[in-house]
Image: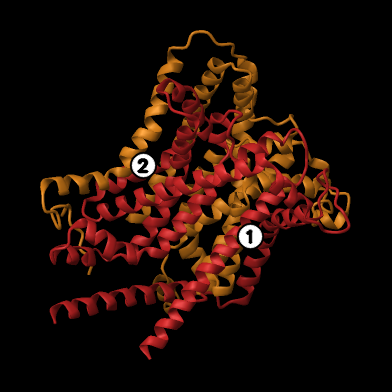
Amino acid sequence: MKTKPRSVGWLGSRSKMSVLGLKLGAWSLVILFGILYVLPLGSWVGLVLDERSFDMNWPLFSSVAWRTLWLSALSSLLCLAGALPLALLWRLGGRAERTTMLAAMGIPLIMGFLARNWSWIGLLTSKKRWQSFGTQLVGLDQWLYTHVSVVVVMSFVFVPIAFFILVQRLRSLTQIQIDAARTLGLSDFRIILGLLLPVSIRACVHSGTIVFALATTFFITPQMLGGGRCDFITNLLLSKLNDGDFSTASIIGLTFLILVTICMVPLVYAGVKLGHGSAR
Amino acid sequence: MRESSLATDLLAERCKATMHILRDSERDTLRNPGIRITLWLASAIPLAAVIMPCLYLFLWAFWGTATVGITNSTPSLQWFSQVARSQDWRDALWYSTWIGILVSASGTFAVTIHSYSAHFFGRSVAVWTQFCVLLPYLIPGVVFGLSLRLVGPQLGAPESILLFAGHLAFVLPIQYFIVENAQERVSRDMLFAGNTLGAGHSINYIHVYLPVIRPTILNSFVIGFFLSFDELVIAAMVLGRADVTVAKKLWDQATKHNTPEPAVIAVLLFVTYGVGLASITGFGMFKKSRNRKIAI
């Protein structure tokens, strides 16, 4: 039986320094993030709010921001649609299916985002049809350097990340619960509908939130597959930085941060609400 | 006698935990072949779309030319030798490797210290920690990179420190969730038993806690290393022209030429991971067979 004490930091501690050390250890990640993350970010926000001279093209920013948000949302939805059957197969399948899924999703993460984006350019521009692995057969090459190729490639690039987050959440449904459902006479279809899908919906909200946040900040695919016609906010920001215009880059960054935070609030709220619903 | 029975109890508990995980993970739940086929059909397109670029990288690395999309008829190692002979590439590989090892080791250490200590405290620690670790993935990474770029020089921090800080902030959340998931194998009673019997926290951490989560520590380190190696957002914001990581170097050349260096780096990473995994698995199997022989 697992015990859950409120605080037994005194156990094993021979002195007050030892208790203090244990407390520091417990809060170490919070302290680390405070120093590494919150401090620079907070200082930067302070610098930006003091900024008076910047050259901001608000119509350009609005159109690029809108494009970033809706293309990221679309990519996230497509990504989830692709990752969910993979995660369900992992959860319900046997050892062979699990090993296949883990290998198939792990290898792309090892090989890297940048290389895979390059690879998509190669697939879509390959002179030999067989080397396109069927992408030219479905006509995807005609959409190179357009919004379509950006959305499609971003969706598939993020599928491994969404898969691992979904799998993480689906693990909360134990084999004992599935066995109990089967003992009560439920078929595979009813088990998926009644047990897995509710957990999957919660998992999809969490996964979708993370993937959306990653997609908004992505600049590799929009630049490489967009051909300059589909730049995201990050591309705009990078170009300002490369020009040495730090003030405008900071204003762009802060405004975009506020926009993304507003978009994330309903997602985070939904995730928390669904999490509390599952606890009941 | 008391110590040996305690040791036996601890061993029995570890066996039970392992068996529970094996039972849970290896059981094939699907009985209806129609459902299985449907799931496989639904998974076919995303699976193919995820695997295809990786296969193309192998094709491009060995058969590639200076133009992406055009391949030679015979394979060659010319691009591998070009990367090996280039001082710039060797410097970038070395820089990325030691940054990756440092970031991954620091992150793994910090997370294991936290997860051990958190066993002795209430839920508020876990709640605040989860909130903090999610921040780098909820707030646009480019904004954080920008803040490092602008605030760092004012603090007098060199680029390598900023890069280390940025990478650690992105790698720590992943390592945290990996180690957190392993906590179900760690019995709080086992930790408390060690303390009750007189072990200090450092002894308890090293001799009781770490051996239970040893595979998790390795997973966390390896995943942290590859995440740091491939990280581009912070590198693009923070690094100048002098020392660059592999990801930054690949990005800088993205607009200039289409030579297969990205594929070469990807294949090298894959081979490194494969060799590492095979070595660890082989060593583990060798140890098991040796222990079995000793037991007999």
Task: Where is residue A158? Give x, y as percent.
Answer: 60, 48
User: Badge 1 sits on which subunit?
Assistant: B
User: Badge 2 sits on which subunit?
Assistant: B
Task: Where is residue B270? Give x, y as percent.
Answer: 63, 57
Q: Colour of chain A?
A: orange
The quadrant where residue B35 appears: bottom right
Report helix, strand or loop for mark 2: helix
Residue A185 visible to an observer of this rendering = no
- Find the residue positioned furthest to the top: A53
Residue that carries the numbered disc 2 in the rendered image: B131
Task: Where is residue B235? Give x, y as percent.
Answer: 56, 35
Q: Is residue B291 left or right of residue B36?
A: left
Q: Given the image, on which type of amino acid does mark 1 rest?
A: Val
B87 and A100: which is toward the camera: B87
Mark 1 or 2, which is nearer the eye?
1
Q: Quadrant of the N terminus of chain A?
A: bottom left
A137 versus B157 height, above or below:
below
User: Going 55% across and 71% down the picture, which residue do you hit?
Assistant: A93
Q: Quadrant of the C terminus of chain A?
A: bottom left
Upstream in the sequence, badge 1 or badge 2?
2
Q: Is residue B175 left or right of residue A193?
A: left
Residue that carries the numbered disc 1 in the rendered image: B271
Classify 10 Å Cα crowding around label 1: few (below 14), some (14-19), many (20 and above).
some
Question: Which label sits on residue B155?
Answer: none
Q: Is residue A258 left or right of residue A4?
A: right
User: Going 44% across and 40% down the picture, which residue do you hit?
Assistant: B169
Q: Which one of the lettered chains is coloured red?
A: B
Between the residue at mark 1 and the residue at mark 2, the CA separation in whole angstroms equals 36 Å
Q: Given the image, on which type of amino acid does mark 2 rest?
A: Phe
User: Going 59% across and 70% down the picture, which residue do you hit?
Assistant: A97
Classify 10 Å Cα crowding around label 2: few (below 14), some (14-19), many (20 and above).
few
